[in-house]
Image: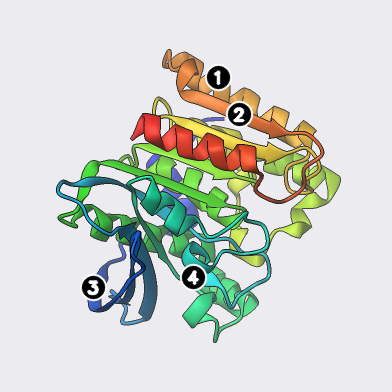
Amino acid sequence: MSISVERLRKLLGIRKAGLTLETCELDNHGTHVVERLHFRSGDGAPIRGILTRPAATSRPLPAILYAHAHGDRYDIGARELVDGRPALLDPPGPAYAREGFVALSIDMPVFGERAGTSESAASKAALWQGRTLFGQMLDEQSAALTWLAQRSDVDPRRIGMTGISMGATLTYFLAAIDKRIAAIAHLCCYADFATLVETGAHDRHGHYLTIPGFLKESSTGEIAGMVAPRPQLICVGTEDPLTPPVAVRRAFAVTAAAYDRLAAASALSLVTEHGIGHSETPSMRRAVLDFFREKL
């Protein structure tokens, strides 16, 4: 199978989104600053954003677009960056700021301050209109990337993306269709979708990820391979029901082949944690921070 960026965008039902910043509130925590942002989308919807950055800098910095997770915690959304969640070791935003990165997260539809609409209702409405909720999420992440790249304290050539669970899937799908992302690292949601369907594990995913006709034309391994030759770090646990080893192996074979074709095998890394479920580990955190320090 081989799918073009244009065809993938059509399957996802992606439209051109935009974000306009309306308000910004600063919280100085000494070692880092938290910016609490309120955007307005192109269709008029309010969208919360949270940004963390070092307290002081004299030059443009590398940046991270941080996609939050799902976890059936519709109340968390973007505040995962500063408050964390059960699947994480601790809040990632301050950790990135200590390493010299600017990091931005925005509420995805039906999460955080946008949780007034259910995931089921939003997914059905999008599908009935020829779109997908996942495509809307990717569209808004791309708009957030545009806004982040325009900041005076950010080097637009050094923007990476990361996330765990739903955030992981958003990460490699967006990097496949948006070449502005220089490097990606994702945790706990990389597996061959067809294999998940075979085993019944696909039903653990939310409605947001329904993409009509996707498996007839592509695979998650191919999508992650479209990131090549840009650096990519994949982290999974062998006991994670969303990343069963057989599904990871099948996806990785396809992704690795894409990197091999571009003579970029060294840019692709897979960290497998034995006996670990759907959660970040200290070695995953070290691997991600080391990865971004080196690649950005």
Q: Which element is circle 1 on?
A: helix
How far apart are labels 3 and 4 at the CA level? 19 Å
How far apart are labels 2 and 1 at the CA level? 14 Å
* Figure quadrant of the N terminus: top right
* Residue under label 3: 20
Q: Identify whether 117 is placed above or below 180.
A: below
Pinpoint residue 33: horizontal percent, then vertical percent.
Answer: 32, 65
Q: Are marks 4 and 1 in contact (CB under 8 Å)?
A: no
Hey, what amino acid is under mark 2? Leu
Instruction: Tell me which numbered mark, 3 or 2, is placed earlier along the sequence.
Output: 3
Q: Quadrant of residue 184?
A: top left
* Residue under label 2: 270
Q: Residue at (59%, 47%) from the top-left corner?
A: 214
| Apparent side of residue 152 relative to residue 135 in the rendered image (left or right) | left
Hey, what amino acid is under mark 1? Ala
How packed mark 4 is, by other alpha carbons closer than 10 Å (few <14, some 14-19, many 20 or more), is many
Q: Are marks 4 and 2 in contact (CB under 8 Å)?
A: no
Q: Quadrant of residue 166?
A: bottom right
Instruction: Tell me which numbered mark, 4 or 2, is placed earlier along the sequence.
Output: 4
Instruction: Tell me which numbered mark, 3 or 4, is placed earlier along the sequence.
Output: 3
Hey, what amino acid is under mark 4? Arg
Hey, what amino acid is under mark 3? Thr
Q: Residue at (43%, 27%) from the top-left corner?
A: 228
Q: Are marks 1 and 3 in contact (CB under 8 Å)?
A: no
Pinpoint residue 286: horizontal percent, then vertical percent.
Answer: 55, 38
Q: Which mark is residue 79?
A: 4
